[in-house]
Amino acid sequence: MIETKGFIGSIEAADTMLKSADIRLVKHEQIDAGLVTVVIEGDVGAVTAAIEAGEIAAAKVGELIASHTIPNLDESMSKILLSETELGKKKKQKKNARVESVQKQVDNSIAVDGETKSGKTKK
């Protein structure tokens, strides 16, 4: 996560982080006194690289307050850090990924009851 003073620095940091590594933007939250926190997630190495790039980008156009990487965030901390809406989205994304995986397996399966995937009967 990165915290900046001002909106523009946070946007620059978020944009740079998303472009520099395979990470996902989880949260962009404005706090009192002009502080903005950007939370990302992904592989620890990717997050570390993205945070480093985001720090540089934020400092160029605004004021970087702090940054921190938490490797392997505990589930109970996720509940504190993320809102219920964001946790719900995360669960839905995991479920959709599982459904897509099963659907691909079904689509790639051998013809059932003598029919191919296109619905035509095998000869």
Image (spheres, rainbow, N blue to C red):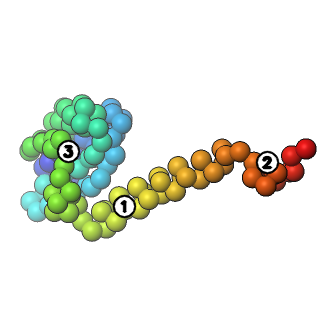
Residue type, numbered disc 3 = Asn
**Camera-nearest residue between 63 and 65:** 65
Image point (9%, 59%), residue name: 33
**Whole-percent x, y for residue 30 in the image:** 19, 59
* Distance of label 3 from label 2 (alpha carbons): 44 Å
Is residue 43 in sight in this rendering?
yes
**Camera-nearest residue between 61 and 21:** 21
Does residue 25 lie above or below 31 as drawn? above
Q: Which mark is residue 6?
A: none
The image shows a total of numbered marks equal to: 3
Q: Earlier in the sequence, mark 3 or mark 1?
A: 3
The answer to whether residue 77 is left or right of residue 87 is left
Image point (11%, 62%), residue name: 32
Label 1 environment density (alpha carbons within 10 Å; few <14, some 14–19, many ≥20): few
**Whole-percent x, y for residue 36 in the image:** 17, 54
Is residue 60 in sight in this rendering?
no
Does residue 2 lie above or below 46 as drawn? below
The reply to whether discs 3 and 2 touch (Cβ–Cβ < 8 Å) is: no
Residue type, numbered disc 1 = Lys
Q: Which mark is residue 116?
A: 2
Q: Secondary structure at mark 3?
A: loop
Instruction: State the residue position of label 3.
Output: 72
The answer to whether residue 51 is left or right of residue 89 is left
Instruction: State the residue position of label 1.
Output: 91
